[in-house]
Image (spheres, rainbow, N blue to C red):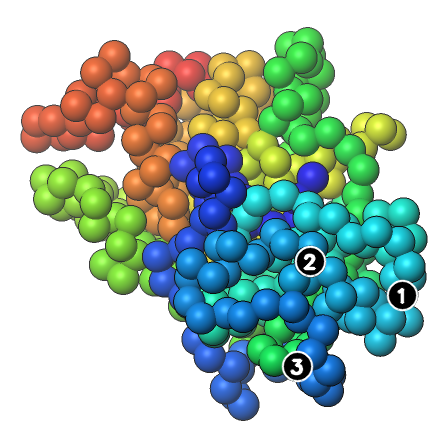
């Protein structure tokens, strides 16, 4: 699996030609007052074998072993970790992710620097925090071995994690019997409850709140793609359904961000899209991508919540979500006979609400 922000349908997935999937907005620069200070900057030695001068250059190089291999090995060497084995690209996403070590037992994730056209210090800070939070909550996630910044022609923030063997949950679920699906959904509900139960405090809480506010605001250009009547209806829905108490939410629980290990353990990956939001924020990627709108999984995940309230929560989470516009289109294509064209009239989202009720009943 790839420990990067390569979400499922409606999420942050790479293009077919393996160009990294670019979010609409880049992060902030690395100021001295960054909410979570980057640990340290290693001295330059020119290991990176490439030139970055904008987005196209990053698209060409972010999976290049020739360009990044020496840098990956040098990071591992300086961190006192095994570095003698081969380096291989670990899959499409947004940042540069490689397997390395002695026999591929390590994953090195290198975040795009400003010269790439996409500066991502917030993703670095948020993903690091998510891994540490999962560890505190006793939730299975890749072990974090090292983190920092490597000054090498450019300023590369990085995380070094353990490679986690397992099958992507979205794939595994397709072959499961109904009872195994129900058990999976209950386990996932328990993991997300535990992840959100720890308090949100300090500068990281403020950062996660800012990200959530940006996701639902006009700053999120994805929502600008919505026709004006639907955008007005989305705003009206959120006014009529004020968000519940906020918690830490993963933000991208899609089919390839959870693994089932050979021992049957459920492992969470890629925390870079986390925000502070109502827990229903996680529902849309779970239902649309991970569950593929499977009724058995949806009903088990709903638990004791009435279907009508669950449908309310799903639409609220959808309208708050960073990738809500894509998830909305995907859900409509698969649940409504006319797709998004069925979202019309004085209550345009009523057909989708009714379809979710039926799915969860």
Q: Residue at x 49, y 22 (%)?
A: 292
Q: Is residue 252 left or right of residue 214?
A: right
Q: CA distance from mark 3 to mark 2?
A: 18 Å
Q: Secondary structure at mark 3?
A: strand
Q: Position of residue 85 (x, y in %)?
A: 89, 54
Q: Quadrant of residue 199?
A: bottom right
The disc label shown at residue 151, or none: 3
Q: Nearer the viewer, residue 128 or 352?
A: 128
Q: Height in image: 60 above or below 48?
A: above
Labels 3, 2: front one: 2
Q: Residue at x 35, y 42 (%)?
A: 324
Mark 3 crowdedness (10 Å alpha carbons): few <14, some 14-19, many ≥20: some
The disc label shown at residue 244, or none: none
Q: Nearer the viewer, residue 1 or 359?
A: 1
Q: CA distance from mark 2 to mark 1?
A: 21 Å
Q: Residue at x 57, y 56 (%)?
A: 62
Q: Are marks 2 and 1 in contact (CB under 8 Å)?
A: no
The residue wearing badge 1 is 81
Query: Which label's residue is closer to the chain start, 3 or 2?
Result: 2
Q: Height in image: 14 above or below 39?
A: above
Q: CA distance from mark 3 to mark 1?
A: 19 Å
Q: Is residue 274 visible?
A: no
Q: From the image, which quarter does the N terminus lie in?
A: top right
Labels 3, 1: front one: 3
Q: Are marks 3 and 2 in contact (CB under 8 Å)?
A: no
Q: Is residue 358 left or right of residue 95?
A: left
Q: From the image, which quarter does the C terminus lie in?
A: top left
Q: Secondary structure at mark 2?
A: helix
The residue wearing badge 2 is 66
> Please, which residue is most extreme toward the bottom here?
32
Q: Is residue 321 visible?
A: yes
């Amino acid at each position: 699996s790839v420990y990067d922000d390569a979400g499922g349908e409606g999420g942050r997935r790479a293009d077919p030609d393996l160009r990294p999937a670019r979010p609409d907005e880049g992060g902030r620069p690395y100021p001295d007052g960054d909410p979570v200070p980057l640990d340290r900057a290693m001295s330059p030695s020119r290991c990176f074998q490439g030139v970055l001068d904008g987005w196209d250059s990053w698209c060409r190089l972010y999976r290049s072993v020739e360009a990044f291999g020496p840098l990956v090995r040098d990071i591992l060497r300086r961190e006192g970790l095994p570095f003698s084995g081969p380096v291989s690209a670990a899959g499409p996403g947004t940042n540069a992710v490689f397997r390395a070590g002695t026999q591929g037992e390590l994953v090195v994730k290198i975040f795009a620097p400003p010269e790439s056209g996409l500066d991502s210090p917030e993703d670095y800070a948020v993903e690091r925090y998510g891994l540490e939070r999962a560890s505190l909550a006793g939730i299975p996630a890749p072990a974090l071995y090292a983190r920092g910044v490597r000054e090498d022609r450019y300023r590369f923030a990085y995380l070094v994690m353990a490679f986690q063997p397992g099958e992507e949950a979205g794939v595994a679920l397709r072959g499961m019997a109904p009872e195994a699906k129900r058990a999976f959904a209950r386990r996932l509900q328990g993991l997300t409850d535990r992840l959100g139960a720890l308090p949100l405090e300090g500068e990281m809480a403020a950062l996660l709140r800012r990200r959530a506010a940006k996701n639902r605001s006009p700053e999120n250009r994805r929502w600008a793609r919505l026709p004006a009547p639907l955008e007005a209806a989305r705003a009206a829905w959120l006014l009529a359904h004020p968000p519940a108490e906020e918690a830490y939410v993963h933000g991208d629980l899609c089919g390839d961000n959870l693994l089932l290990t050979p021992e049957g353990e459920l492992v969470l990956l890629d925390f870079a899209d986390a925000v502070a939001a109502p827990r229903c924020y996680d529902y849309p990627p779970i239902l649309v991508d991970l569950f593929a709108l499977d009724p058995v999984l949806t009903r088990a995940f709903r638990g004791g919540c009435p279907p009508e309230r669950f449908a309310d929560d799903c639409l609220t989470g959808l309208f708050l979500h960073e990738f809500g516009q894509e998830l909305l289109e995907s859900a409509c294509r698969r649940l409504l006979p006319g797709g998004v064209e069925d979202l019309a009239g004085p209550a345009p989202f009523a057909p989708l609400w009714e379809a979710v009720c039926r799915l969860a009943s």
